[in-house]
Image (cartoon, helix red, strand yellow):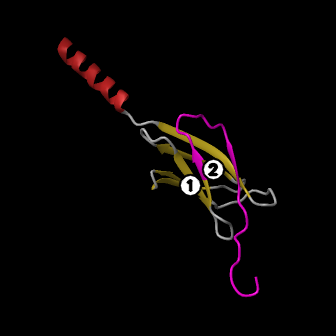
Amino acid sequence: MRLLKYVLLLVGLAIIVSCDAYTSVRGKVIGPDCQPVEGAVIQTRVDDHPYTARESDARGMFWVECVHGKAEEFRIVVSKAGFQQKVIRLHPHFRYEEILVQLEPEELDGPGT
C-alpha cells in the first residue's frame, strides 16, 4: 500500500511538471472613436494554429486563454467586419492585466476611392 501511494505521488508530480504553459488575457476592443466594439472575434494562435476564439461583449470586453507549451510567443488576432484585422504578439511568460485593442476602419479599395 505504501508503494502504491509513492507511485501515485510520482505519477502526479510527473503530470504537473509536464503540463503545458498557460496564459490568460483580458482586454477591451475599441474603435477609432474610442467607443467599445461589440462582437469582435478575438482568437488566440500558437505557431499559426488557432487555439481559442471569443467575442467581445457590449462593453468591448473579452477574456481568452491559451495553452502554449514552450512557444516563445503567441498571438491574439482581433477581427470584426468593417475594421482592419489586428494582430498582437504576446510573450507567454509575461502577465497581462488588461490589454487595449483599437481597431481601425477597413480601407476601401476600388473605383471612386
| Magenta region includes residue 111 | yes
- Residue at (19, 18) in percent of width and height: 4
Q: Position of residue 12 (x, y in %)?
A: 31, 25
Q: Which residues are magenta?
A: 88-113
Q: Main secondary structure of the magenta part?
A: loop
- Name the secondary structure under disc 2: strand
- Residue at (68, 67) in percent of width and height: 83
Residue 25, located in which quarter of the rendered image? Answer: top right
In the image: residue 38, left or right of residue 69: right
- Name the secondary structure under disc 1: strand
Residue 1 seen: no
> Mark 1 and mark 2 in contact (Cβ < 8 Å)?
yes
Q: Position of residue 67 (x, y in %)?
A: 45, 42
Q: Residue tagged by mark 1?
A: 54
Q: Residue tagged by mark 2?
A: 62
Residue 29 seen: yes
- Which residue extends farthest bottom? 111
- Residue at (45, 51) in percent of width and height: 47
Q: Position of residue 86 (x, y in %)?
A: 63, 58
Within-10-Å neighbours for mark 1: few <14, some 14–19, many 20+: some
| Magenta region includes residue 53 | no
Q: CA distance from mark 2 to mark 1?
A: 7 Å
